[in-house]
Amino acid sequence: MASFVDEQDEVVRFISDAPPTHYKLKIQLFSILVENAVEKYESAEFEAGGYRWKLVLYPNGNKSKNVKDHISLYLTLTDTSSLPLGWEVYAVLRLFLLDQCKDKYLTVQDAIGKESHFHELNLECGFDHFVPLKAFNDASNGYLVEDKCVFGTEVFVTKERGRVQAECLSMTKDTSSVKYVWKIENFSKFSEMDYYSEAFSVRGHKWKIQVFPKGIDSMWSYLSFYLDLVDHTPDSKAYTDCTLRIVDQLQAKHIAFKADHCFTPANFYCGWPKFVTRSYLNDPGNGCLVKDVCVVEAEVNVWGCQSSTADMVK
């Protein structure tokens, strides 16, 4: 088994009798990919080392990396949604191309001691200059025979890192808010201490309006009004600005209060215990109660979400 190292790319290339152990990709009528200017081809998913992968082939080179006159070949880690925050996978990666004349494989891997490093911002590892197109198309090399070729891969996971202490703060440039309107009928007949609206969604979180018609705690002469985050997790945070409003159904002189608030599991609500006096609310001239209907609104803008993990290194 002869081998040589391309020092510029820190890549080892050698000829091997052993076929790839994890996946083979056979392409018939390879010229169709070239003629139709197919930029890249992705294989089906396969499993190796407890992870899901795909082979990704650029028949005319990876143009995004300014590759010319070569085939580019990579391995991509897929289905990462179930992996813990901060995950990393280190692996020894080998990519193969069959010499169909000699039944041997051109095998390409990183230089000895170098590992492919997959993580959230780098799902793809491989070789920009996997094989020159001139060599690939040369019939004497056996790579392309009767317009057929066979690629392959094997990937050996050497180290996994995940479940590290980490957090992710997800911001948004979209400053538009979501308004939820709750029309409360038969308001004067409410006898319970507090009432909740139906849940509504803002940026992937579920919220509810909470109203205390006769006030909270000892503030019986007021209506208390809150916004609750109802799907919080132990480590989640949601940074918001929110406006709570009682609609004046007669003159549009609404009662509204606005606040910036960070919702957490320990502080999952925002509101005002003395939102409006019950005497003002019940005055028919103020438009808060019309035909025993009270209309309340929550206007919510979530501009940042944070999640975290606090597990041990795997």
Image (cartoon, rainbow, N blue to C red):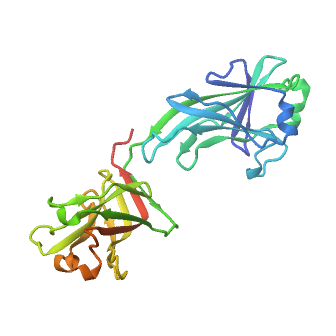
Q: Kindly indicate the quadrant of the structure image that contains residue 188.
A: bottom left
Residue at point 35% right, 67% down? 298
Say if 206 sits above or below 77 in the image. Answer: below
> Residue reaching furthest left?
218
Residue 291 falls left or right of residue 63: left
Task: Work out whether residue 313 or residue 53 is closer to the camera in this orientation and state it.
Answer: 53
Task: Work out whether residue 146 or residue 180 is closer to the camera in this orientation and state it.
Answer: 180
Q: Position of residue 287 (x, y in %)?
A: 29, 78
Q: Position of residue 45 (x, y in %)?
A: 61, 31
> Residue reaching furthest right?
139
Task: Work out whether residue 279 or residue 199 is closer to the camera in this orientation and state it.
Answer: 279
Say if 288 sits above or below 52 in the image. Answer: below
Task: Work out whether residue 159 or residue 174 is closer to the camera in this orientation and state it.
Answer: 174
Q: Position of residue 84 (x, y in %)?
A: 42, 43
Residue at point 49% right, 69% down? 176
Total marks placed:
0
Residue at point 52% right, 47% down? 120
Residue at point 56% right, 27% down? 47
Residue 18 falls left or right of residue 147: left
Q: Kindly indicate the quadrant of the structure image that contains residue 111.
A: top right
Q: Quadrant of the C terminus?
A: top left
Residue 186 falls left or right of residue 138: left
Say if 30 sits above or below 180 in the image. Answer: above
Q: Quadrant of the N terminus?
A: top right
Q: Kindly indicate the quadrant of the structure image that contains residue 61.
A: top right
Residue 277 falls left or right of residue 148: left
